Amino acid sequence: MPIHKDPTGIDDRIEAVTGNSVEALWRLDDSNLLTEPVARLVHAHRALAKAQATLTFNRTLLQRLMGRIGS
């Protein structure tokens, strides 16, 4: 999975709890170097980040389509 680029609303809390940046956590997860509870947290965060990116993409697409309809 690509390295995290767009922050989510909980990145700062994840970083505070784990003591690592989100990017570092994702790299450690890719290398299977996380303990099981932290790995579960990172997997949930990745799912959140993917859902957020998908939502943003689809919202932008809908706005563009609505702009074409209104023109």
Image (tube, rainbow, N blue to C red):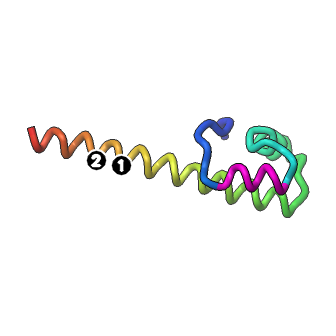
Residue 33 screen position, x and y as percent: 90, 46
Q: Is residue 30 left or right of residue 52?
A: right
Determine whether label 2 and label 1 are within 8 Å by CB: yes
The numbered disc on residue 14 is none
Q: Main secondary structure of the magenta part?
A: helix
- Bin the neighbour count of mark 1 within 10 Å (Cα to Cα): few under 14, some 14-19, many 20 and up: few
- Bin the neighbour count of mark 2 within 10 Å (Cα to Cα): few under 14, some 14-19, many 20 and up: few
The residue labelled by disc 2 is 62
Give how far apart the Cα atoms at labels 2 and 1 are: 5 Å
Give the position of the C terminus as an image quadrant.
Answer: top left
Amino acid under disc 1: Arg
Q: Which residues are magenta?
A: 10-17
The residue labelled by disc 1 is 59
Give the position of the N terminus as an image quadrant.
Answer: top right
Residue 34 screen position, x and y as percent: 88, 51
* Count of numbered badges drawn on the protein: 2
